[in-house]
Image (cartoon, rainbow, N blue to C red):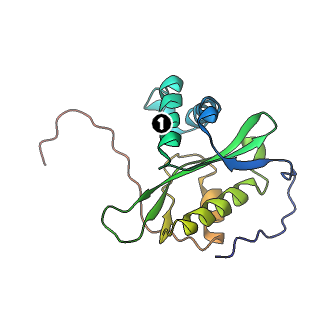
Amino acid sequence: MNIALRHVRRSTDTSHIEIRAATVDDAPEIARLFGEYFHATQWQYLLTYDEAKTTKRVRELIEGRKTPHLLAWDRDKVVGILSWHYDCQYVAEPIAVMDETYVDPEYRQTDLGRKMVAIALYFAKLDNAAVFNFPIASGLPSTRTLVNLLKKFGGEICGVIVRCKPQGDYDGR
């Protein structure tokens, strides 16, 4: 896998940003960023975000070592996150499945997202993942940008996500 990053002239320099694996101590800052992400999406109109519950769950996921979280830190603030899990219930090789991808709006016109995707793909390859699926259901205007970025890594659209809000009884008709 070639994870070399092309030289791209962007408006914000990200060379000072540290990208690293999350630790349990990062859970509150991750929950803060997830809240920011949540309130920028269509989910805010359907669900209520719970930062305390999110902090607890993120701690559990990181402690269990089954859901890697990459964090991008600009000094003392998380400005990007990419998390995924492995699914191998029915196949011989693991499938990496992205859970969350979010870059602070201030850093979206930089190479930060590209760096994070490259690192995640690298680790998935080390873990023998056969593919890396990126389901995208946020409804953010930047979704097309993420899809275009993934295509640059050889990604292809291979499905559709449909959201249904349960309403009343379903009688099968």
- The amino acid at mark 1 is Glu
Residue pictured at 75% horizontal, 42% vertical:
73
Judge by depth and name the residue closer to the eye, 3 or 9: 3
Q: Residue 141's spot in the image, x, y percent? A: 62, 48
| For residue 45, above or below residue 62 | above
Q: How many marks?
A: 1
Asked which quadrant contains residue 88, the reply is bottom left
Q: Residue 132's spot in the image, x, y percent? A: 51, 65
| For residue 157, above or below residue 53 | below
Quadrant (top left/top right/bottom left/bottom right) for the N terminus:
bottom right
| Residue 103 visible within the image | no
Judge by depth and name the residue closer to the eye, 145 or 53: 53
Q: Is mark 1 on a helix, strand or loop?
A: helix
Q: Is residue 8 left or right of residue 171?
A: right
| Residue 13 visible within the image | yes
Q: In this view, does 43 lie to the left or right of 163?
A: right
Q: Is residue 171 left or right of residue 29?
A: left
Circle 1 packing at 10 Å, graded few (<14), some (14-19), many (20+), is some
Q: Residue 66's spot in the image, x, y percent? A: 47, 50
Asked which quadrant contains residue 39, the reply is top right
Residue tagged 1: 60
Q: Residue 121's spot in the image, x, y percent? A: 60, 65
| For residue 87, above or below residue 3 | above
Residue pictured at 55% horizontal, 35% vertical:
38
Judge by depth and name the residue closer to the eye, 153 or 64: 64
Residue pictured at 55% horizontal, 64% vertical:
124
Residue pictured at 49% horizontal, 68% vertical:
129
